[in-house]
Amino acid sequence: MKVGLLGLGTVGTGVYEIINHQRGNYFASSKQEIVISKVMVRDIDKKRKVDVPAEYLTTDFKDIIDDEEIKVVICVMGGLEAEYNYMIQSMKRGKHVITANKAAVSEYMDVLYKTARENNVSFLYEASVGGGIPIITSLIQILRINQISEIKGILNGTTNFILSKMSDEGWDFEETLIKAQELGFAEADPTADIEGFDVSRKLSILSSMSFGFHIKDEDIKKRGIKEITSADIDTINDMGYVIKYLAHSKLEGNTYYATVEPVLLSTKDIMSNVNEEFNIISINGDIIGELQFYGKGAGKDATANAVVGDLMYIINADFRKQEIVLDQQLENGGIKEFSGKYYLRADSDNHEEFSHIIDTISDFSNNKKIIFNRSKVFVVTDEVRADQFEELVLELKSKNINLFYARIYS
């Protein structure tokens, strides 16, 4: 079997090494010859960490799409529109498609499924969520018996690394981000991670599969972690909580609710003990109850392993026609289904600001604990609905008050 590979970056290199350099046990012992015969790259002359014969490299997608011997196309270039179009073209030419591109899957899941079904090919995307955690395959299996009502998890290794180091080492956000970039955990442009887009796309994929309705990234309320300060970390630690970046979606009747946000977890919570680049995903089914999946959520080997795992399904003819059907009619309920006590830190430079902060909070929460220390107001409210607390925050921000807040999971 011949395979076409789009992209030879970190993940693409890992995939190439497992297959063509026979790093995987299967490929070292298999009697069937399986080889990546064409690799599409942007620059053929670029120096690379992996040795690829010159005749394997191309900058022209036609060299892959027109090769009838290539039965599978692996898409790990990144980006959105270009790779999406390559996937569609490949499936229309009868080629199976494997991708790690969470942005494309999240945005075009319905069209990609439809195209795969119409052309009787497989569309697999295990590596798009959870790195080396086999969550997509497991979720498909669970959905054969269960209805899924809730998904919750830590889905981004970069932000989890940053928050872990801020909590454990006492570093501030900017210092930790630079360290994460030096170690290769964060991209040069970390926006997708720290603003929540990466997590939101992953939650979009899992929620769409689980709830049977295409939920796009843009449909999920998200906020990032860059407003967290060392003062927040110290206070939260003293309160006996751990701060984590959590993805959470629920299905109630014909309405879904989804959010990506920093939250406070008890130190006894399993998720509070998931650190650095590791991920955890919790799925709640009506029959099986809660299941949790844990493992490395990022990195060359973990993601490449997930890509090649999908290839194994195709090699062994284990792939089936797409089982996920996105035919439900659901409404977006926003975040009003989420509620809890809230931690709030607001910076106050004068008495007028301090009074405005306290008065505004009092409009939403009767019972509250307040600490004032060095021009910072720290507040823990009683239980407030998430959408109502957002109104409180907007009121404070309208007065240019610098703040950070997080819902407390009890």
Image (cartoon, rainbow, N blue to C red):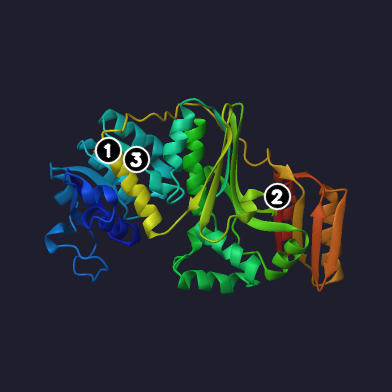
**Is residue 69 positioned above or below 36 on the image?**
above
The one nearer the camera, 351 or 321, is 321
- Residue 301, image x and y in percent? 37, 57
Residues under labels 3 and 1: Cα distance?
A: 9 Å
**Residue at figure coordinates x 25%, y 68% from the top left:** 48
The part of the image, by quadrant, that contains residue 20 is bottom left
Q: From what the image shows, is residue 52 above or below residue 391?
A: below
Question: Mark 1 touching mark 2, by CB under 8 A?
Answer: no
Q: Nearer the viewer, mark 3 or mark 2?
A: 3
Distance CA(mark 3)–CA(mark 2): 38 Å
Horizontal and vertical percent for residue 51? 20, 65
Mark toward the start of the polypeptide (1 vs 2): 1
Mark 3 or mark 1: whose residue is earlier in sequence: 3
In front of the other: label 1 or label 2?
1
x then y, percent, for residue 186: 47, 65
Which residue bears the numbered disc 2?
390
Q: Amino acid at mark 1?
A: Ile
Between 24 and 79, the one nearer to me in the picture: 24
Residue under numbered circle 1: 314
Q: Secondary structure at mark 1?
A: helix
Instruction: Find the distance from the CA under tag 1 to the CA under tag 2.
Output: 47 Å
Q: Would you say residue 99 is visible in this rendering?
A: no
Query: x%, y% of residue 133?
Result: 45, 47
